[in-house]
Image (spheres, rainbow, N blue to C red):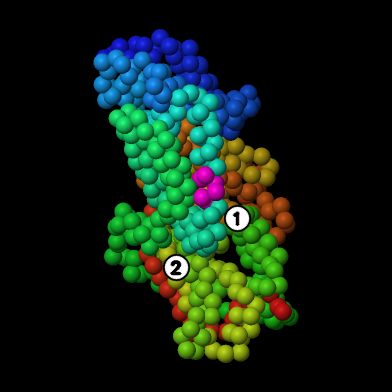
Amino acid sequence: MIKHLLIKDWKLLWPMIGLVTAIQIGHEWAVYRSGLFGESAGAEVLMRPLTLAWFAGIAALAAATVHQDAIPGIDQDWLIRPLRRTELLLSKLIFVALTIALPMGALNLAHTLAMHMPLALSLKAIVAKELFVFVCFVIPVMAVASATRNMTELLLVAAALVLVYALGVGASALLLGDAWCPTCNTGMAWLQHLLQHLLILAGACLILGLQYYRRTSTLSQSLALVGAGLLAFLQVTWSSAFAVERLLSGVREDATLVVLELGPQGAPPAGEIPGAVPEARRAAQHLMHGDVDQAIVDLRRQARTSDNVALDLPVRASRAADEMLLADRSQVRLFDRHGGILYSSVSANSPGLMFTSADDPAHSLGHDIVKIPAKTYEAAAVAPVRLQLDYFLTRVKRGSEYRIAADNGRLQAPDIGVCATSADRNTVTLHCKSIRPAPFCFSATLYDSEGRHNPEVFKCDPDYRRHWPPLVDILNFYGVDVPLRDRYGIAHYTVDASSLGSSYLLFRIYTELDHIERSVTAASFQPQVWRTQGP
């Protein structure tokens, strides 16, 4: 019977199947033709509408397949035919797999082979991607469609689900405050996404079961709406997420060598007003290292409100010379003389707190900017207080490195994919596409033919997900911009546009080692010494 149902659905839906396949072909062509630097202007223009059409077409085909034998209502002829519910459900799942996943996989394979990606890795990534799209997108759409009679009802229910979820997010953020989404903006956010996908899949399977075996449409719609509202409240706690990451990465014995301590902070230099703004100095340092974004963040910190006082807390780290430390989360607490908490604050991805190489390869300095209420500052300035900084850190280690010509260079390697460079008088741009997960931390350094080089430019966006396939494009895209000069006129770069013809980029990949916790304590903390701005 499954075979007859497949033939029947094909005869009724072949025009829609052809349209969805054409959309997939157009999208894959646009992604391929756009290349690494948007070589085809037409393909770049078509990317956004084709991506929207990709989602809409797949959802429409999955829903139309279910609606050919709609579950709600009493006028469906399949109810009186000798048709088993299991066979009906399986036929729908097999049909969408053949008409959506199979063409998509073939197009993805053609794309990866055209990019000269390894066949074995391509097939592995394609299978993972198609399964991801099927269980996390197609099945939920089919579940919602099974509780509706036609496309009009489906659109209404889908709009209601979006509205309920949005209200749930707003309510949870209002009620939970800082405790809402502890993993957001951290490398552990993938665990929250995984939990949500699993809950959506479980709800979709429950609804499909209720519809095909019990035909309880009202109950199914109610469960979908309640689930959409509760989904925003179900959050992975930080302690659980960090424990999972430590378990996955393992515990290394050399982690005990990592020690944090509060860095030196003495009197201001001669001629400088006590408590004067060090933001400009720090911004200049970031510019010299090619980190323009962080320099802008430093300068914007001067625009704080009068209700807060900003403290600059240098934290020195002891570690291996070829390692870096990334602060995923930090907590600052001020205690009074009796142990009571005067102030407590938690921040994710502490801005600027990345411990890299310094003059002493075994040590490095990071700056944590903490803003405390003015009243707390005044109370702490007249009585002894104790400062405690708690850090959740990720150790990353320098891995493979490659050389690529600074201008019009091209490089292909198994762990980085296909990379190319493009340069103008201000910037050298490195773009890569890989069949593997994109590295979350890497750097590029511009060298000339005589060995002189500009500061190393880091790009670290913590993301510790493992084998998480992309939803639309089979290839992962990443890159970095390496400046050739300082547009603010503060830093001096040794290698400039005049020597690009003989220059190259040294591209380094940093890999995750493990996750550790460290604390820094100052028994007699004087906040006025660490203040970034005067009264």
Query: How many labels, in total?
Result: 2
Asked if 207 appears above or below 364 in the picture, the reply is: above
Disc 2 is placed on an element classified as strand
Q: Position of residue 274 (x, y in %)?
A: 69, 81
If you read the primary sequence from the N terminus, does the residue marked by circle 1 or circle 2 appear first? Answer: 1
Crowding at dot 1, Cα within 10 Å, few <14 / some 14-19 / many 20+, comes out as many
- For image coordinates 53% across by 38% down, the residue present is 160
Magenta highlight range: 164-169
Q: Is residue 254 visible?
A: yes
Image quarter (top left, top right, bottom left or bottom right) of the C terminus:
bottom right
Under mark 1, the amino acid is Asp
Whole-percent x and y of residue 254? 31, 65
Residue under the image location 45 percent in, 53 percent down = 233
Position in image of residue 368 (x %, y %): 55, 68
Residue annotated with mark 1: 291
Q: Which residue is mark 2?
A: 391
Q: Residue furthest top?
A: 11
